[in-house]
């Protein structure tokens, strides 16, 4: 965990209400895909937790959706502006469990953290299948980016306006060794129910601090209480306890 | 004498800055970032007799210049705190720590305090009669002078350590409650706990917090906290620990001028994990700026 100042290189609209922000700064605290950063914004008391989409030496890429006043303010920020960002938060995905043919399932703004994960899995020589789910065609992003990494990509939209019609769980392949997923809660539940291998799921919760101090984002698991921000956001399929 | 030092109920503090309970865990998250021995002490996560998960999520809501929490005293229970958390803490923190205790009955408070009384690491017992986020306990003890006095007496009977009673601002007359605690033997008073608050999500048209209401904290509450610290400090003879919205060295000095012997820093630790360290480090130059030689001299002089 490190609190450092980043400079915006680019901040652009890539799909309906979805922006891609590239920043330069010290990324050494980021140790795994699936981790997140917590961004301080002028005039807002709490920080905004955003998942890491891509991370290289001194370069951080975030893809975020405008859902409230904070992200709306972020979307108006310009190249050269600075942000104080707490980096290296959360546990992230573990690629060592993936087997040869991992399946990645992303829904909406759950897609971004899977990008760095896919990059790592490809670099490890694995055959990566990616299913990206959105509501409509205008929300679709990163199909080509995942293809460029060498992934087998399927897009599904709920209304059928792009790719296959349906949810990510309607287009599951027959053959995969492990799964990784991130997306809205109903999607995570469906993925949990319909997958036939072990896997890792990334959860979202309203956070106070983002680094394990306030107990604001706790959840119950089979192995005890976990803080989504510190012990998560990625949890193993086997430890998940659906409470509602 | 060090110009930052203060004495809280007979124990020397190298400086008056104390991260508040519930905003600092058991210290380790912060010890990863900086040497937490720079702090006067800290008040660890509110501890109860039995383990508690706390309230359903969402537990957090943002506000202008603050936040609402409804964590609901999540903690592993006093036995695990003593056998697991305190030994881990010992490795990173070498000063007496403040143990924050909550309960659901007078007996609960006494039980938990008696166990913590046997821990050498614990310097003070901060008895929380003001948690707004639990039913049938917490704040209900701190809104009635008789109940607050009863808890204080029960705890004093089982410990030799200084007992600091943490009060709720959600009352009509905080001075009467502070005096009742003093009369019952409290060694100190800390205030204020969070203000009961609420937010409603315009998209869902439902409360943001699952528990509907929660405790409001952050810079927005500083004036309310200062007023109450001032009132209580002028009404009791025992030391007062001031808290509520403190986020800078200036705020610490303001609290001390109002009558605080030491000052707790809460929500600010959550938005800036270095906040308490920054405040300690900024104190000398801030004192210089306002012509303050040492902090002990200014307590309650406003």
Image (cartoon, coloured by chain):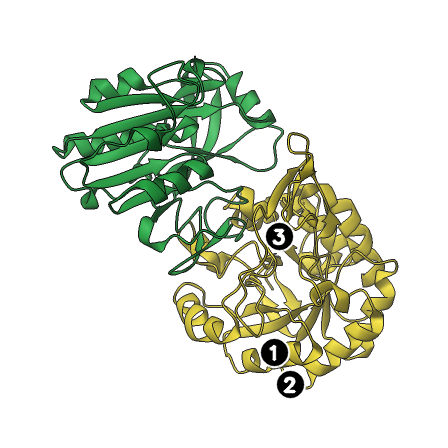
Which SS class for mark 2?
loop
**Residues indicated by labels 3 and 2 sit on the same polypeptide chain:** yes
- Horizontal and vertical percent for residue B37? 47, 60
Q: CA distance from mark 3 to mark 2?
A: 28 Å
Residue drawn at point x = 57 percent, y = 73 percent: B123
Q: Count neighbours of disc 3 (C-alpha within 10 A) and say few if under 14, some if 14 to 19, many if 20 or more.
A: many
- Horizontal and vertical percent for residue A88? 37, 40
Which chain has been coloured green in this picture?
A
Up/down of B49 relative to B207, above or below: below
Residue that carries the numbered disc 3 in the rendered image? B265
Instruction: Judge left or right: residue B233 versus residue B122.
Output: right
Which SS class for mark 1?
helix
**Residues indicated by labels 2 and 1 sit on the same polypeptide chain:** yes
- Residue B3, by quadrant, is bottom right
Residue that carries the numbered disc 1 in the rendered image? B113
Earlier-in-chain disc, 1 versus 3: 1
Asked if the residues shown at circle 3 and circle 2 are in contact, with their CB atoms under 8 angstroms apart, the answer is: no
Which SS class for mark 3?
strand
Residue that carries the numbered disc 2 in the rendered image? B158
Q: Nearer the viewer, residue B9 or A189?
A: A189
């Amino acid at each position: 965990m490190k609190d450092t100042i980043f400079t915006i290189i680019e901040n652009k609209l890539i799909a309906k209400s979805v922006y891609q922000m590239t920043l330069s700064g010290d990324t050494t605290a980021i140790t795994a895909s699936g981790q997140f950063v917590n961004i301080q914004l002028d005039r807002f008391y709490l920080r905004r937790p955003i998942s890491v989409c891509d991370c290289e030496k001194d370069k951080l890429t975030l893809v975020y959706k405008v859902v409230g006043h904070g992200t709306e303010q972020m979307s108006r920020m310009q190249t050269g502006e600075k942000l104080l960002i707490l980096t290296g938060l959360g546990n992230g995905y573990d690629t060592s469990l993936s087997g040869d043919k991992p399946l990645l399932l992303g829904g909406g703004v759950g897609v971004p953290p899977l990008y760095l994960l896919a990059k790592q899995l490809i670099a490890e020589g694995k055959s990566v299948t990616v299913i990206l789910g959105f509501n409509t065609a205008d929300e679709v992003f990163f199909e080509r980016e995942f293809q460029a990494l060498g992934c087998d990509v399927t897009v599904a939209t709920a209304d059928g306006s792009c790719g296959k019609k349906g949810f990510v769980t309607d287009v599951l392949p027959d053959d995969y060794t492990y799964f990784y997923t991130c997306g809205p809660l109903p999607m995570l539940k469906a993925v949990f129910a319909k997958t036939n291998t072990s896997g890792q799921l990334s959860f979202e919760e309203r956070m106070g601090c983002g680094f394990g101090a306030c107990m604001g984002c706790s959840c119950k698991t089979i192995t005890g209480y976990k803080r989504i921000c510190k012990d998560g956001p990625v949890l193993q399929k086997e430890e998940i306890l659906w409470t509602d | 004498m060090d110009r930052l030092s203060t004495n809280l109920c007979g124990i020397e503090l190298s400086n008056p800055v104390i991260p508040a309970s519930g905003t600092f865990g058991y210290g380790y998250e912060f010890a990863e970032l900086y040497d937490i021995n720079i702090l006067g002490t800290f008040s660890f996560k509110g501890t109860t007799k039995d383990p508690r998960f706390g309230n359903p999520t969402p537990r957090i809501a943002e506000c202008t210049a603050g936040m609402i929490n409804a964590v609901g005293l999540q903690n592993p229970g006093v036995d695990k705190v003593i056998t697991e958390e305190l030994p881990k803490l010992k490795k990173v923190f070498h000063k007496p720590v403040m143990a924050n205790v909550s309960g659901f009955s007078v007996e609960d408070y006494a039980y938990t305090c008696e166990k913590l009384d046997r821990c050498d690491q614990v310097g003070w017992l901060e008895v929380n009669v003001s948690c707004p986020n639990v039913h049938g306990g917490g704040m209900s003890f701190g809104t009635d002078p008789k109940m607050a006095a009863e808890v204080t007496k029960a705890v004093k009977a089982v410990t030799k350590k200084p007992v600091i009673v943490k009060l709720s601002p959600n009352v009509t007359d905080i001075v009467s409650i502070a005096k009742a605690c003093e009369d019952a033997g409290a060694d100190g008073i800390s205030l204020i706990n969070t203000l009961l608050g609420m937010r409603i999500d315009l998209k869902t048209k439902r409360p943001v917090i699952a528990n509907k209401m929660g405790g409001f904290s952050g810079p927005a509450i500083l004036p309310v906290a200062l007023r109450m610290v001032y009132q209580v400090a002028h009404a009791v003879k025992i030391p007062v620990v001031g808290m509520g919205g403190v986020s800078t060295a200036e705020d610490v000095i303001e609290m001390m001028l109002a009558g605080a012997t030491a000052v707790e820093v809460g929500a600010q630790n959550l938005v800036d994990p270095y906040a308490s360290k920054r405040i300690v480090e900024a104190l000398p130059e801030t004192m210089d700026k306002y012509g303050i030689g040492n902090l002990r001299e200014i307590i309650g002089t406003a």
